[in-house]
Image: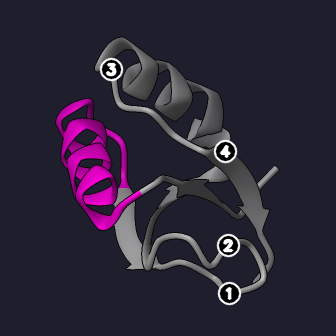
Amino acid sequence: MSGFAVILVHSTGHAVQAERVLKRAGLTVKLIPTPRHLSSDCGSAVRIATTDRDRGADVLSKAGIAIDRIEALDD
């Protein structure tokens, strides 16, 4: 399975923090504007490879970073 997923968080600060933690864990991530069809709550989200979705969620959970949800990103 290929492609990307989006980690939705509650604030831009959480998105920046999540990006930093995930990068430190060795994952390839990118801070992106939150796609409007997924949420209007926060202006930023973190894009991650679909194959890293479970690992990313685990890393963020262990770091104590709350996420809203992770959604598949349609290209």
In the image, is 42 to the left or to the right of 11? right
Q: What scheme was used to colour the molecule?
A: one colour
Query: Could you classify mark 3 by the number of other residues whose Cα lies within 10 Å: few (under 14), some (14-19), or many (20 or more)?
Result: few
**Which one is earlier in the sequence, the residue at label 4 or at label 1?**
1
Lower sequence index among marks 3 and 1: 1
Disc 3 + disc 2, Cβ < 8 Å: no
Is residue 59 one of those drawn in magenta? no
Residue sitting at 67 percent across and 72 percent down? 39
Name the residue furthest top. 62
**Which residues are the magenta region?**
11-28
Mark 4, other Cα within 10 Å: few <14 / some 14–19 / many ≥20: few
Q: Are marks 1 and 2 in contact (CB under 8 Å)?
A: yes
- The residue that label 4 is drawn on is 69
Residue corresponding to mark 3: 64
Alpha carbon separation for disc pair 1 and 2: 5 Å
- Residue 39's disc is 2
Q: Residue at x 29, y 20 (%)?
A: 63
Q: Residues within 10 Å of mark 2 (few under 14, many from 20)?
A: some
Gap between marks 3 and 1 measured at Cα: 26 Å
Distance between mark 4 and mark 3 Cα atoms: 14 Å
